[in-house]
Image (spheres, rainbow, N blue to C red):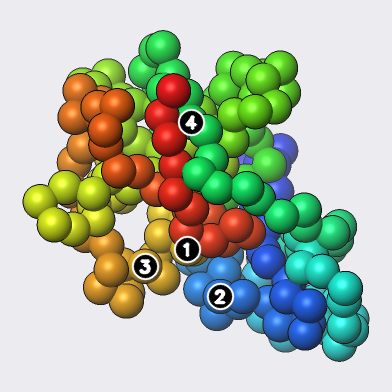
Amino acid sequence: MHKRSPDFCLIETMRLERTGQVLRLALHLQRLRRSAQQLGFSYEHKAILQALSPSMQRRYHSAQRLRLSLAYNGAISIQQAPLPPTATPVLLRLSPFSAQPQPLLLRHKTDARHHWHTGEQFLAQHPNYFDVIYYDQHGYLTEGTRTNIYLWTNGQWVTPPATQDLLAGVQRQYLINKGWVQEQPIHYQQLLPSSRLRVSNALRGWLDATLY
């Protein structure tokens, strides 16, 4: 009996600067390669660079959103669109219930996003909000539908550890590598109206945020 191939693609959503530079490209490809190896996807590094090359050889009037999709058989597709600016601080909503998706779908960036359907539906209906933040069954924050979350506490920025079944974002990893952020469990009850918060993703960077 043949093993059924996954019905989803691995994806990387990247920021393409006006100069044609893909921000944090090495970290994006490291994560993609790691996920491909763990899930049995075909990964050809040279083919991926060739697929990205046309977008990287141009110059633009504004930053671009560049999405790379990798199918199980190694097929690559690229989508590109202008990236609108983001006003800060961005507005966050704490999910009214804990998230309990399959860990497999949390630790890898894929286009199988049904586990975030409720949050994405809320954001579509409330465009003033930037993201919905989730917590696990014990009340500890995990991540948002599109960002990682950070809290300023005891003189440092902290973010939930990757062991809490979350997607380790590329921007998050960059901040950790720089020593600007430490991993630490954050309970949702630690979030107060006066809390200093930030969120991040590879597209938008590290953004000041307000919970409402």
Q: Position of residue 49 (x, y in %)?
A: 74, 82
3 and 1 marks in contact (CB < 8 Å): yes
Q: Amino acid at mark 1?
A: Gln
The image quadrant that residue 168 belongs to is: bottom left
Q: Given contact means CB atoms under 8 Å apart, are the residues at marks 4 and 2 in contact? A: no
Which residue is painted at 79% across and 78% down in the image?
18
Vertical comparison of 108 with 43: above or below: above
Q: Circle 3 — which element?
A: helix
Task: From the image, tell me which residue sits under label 3.
Answer: 175
Relative to residue 63, is residue 35 drawn left or right? Answer: left
Q: Residue at x 62, y 48 (%)?
A: 87
Q: Earlier in the sequence, mark 4 or mark 3?
A: 4
The residue tagged with tag 2: helix, strand or loop? Answer: loop
- Callout 2: 10 Å neighbours few (<14), some, many (20+)? some
Relative to 39, is 54 above or below?
Answer: below
The residue where tag 4 is placed is 92
Q: Nearer the viewer, residue 94 or 55?
A: 94
Quarter where residue 21 is shown: bottom right
**Distance in Å between CA atoms under marks 2 and 1:** 8 Å
> Which quadrant is home to the N terminus?
top right
Q: Residue at x 44, y 49 (%)?
A: 208
Q: Kindly identify the amino acid type of the residue bearing the numbered disc 2.
A: Arg
Residue 171: which disc? Answer: 1
Sort mark 3 into few (<14), some (14-19) or many (20+) by Cα contacts within 10 Å.
some
Indicate whether 205 appears above or below 118: below
Residues at marks 2 and 1 touching, judged by CB atoms closer than 8 Å = yes
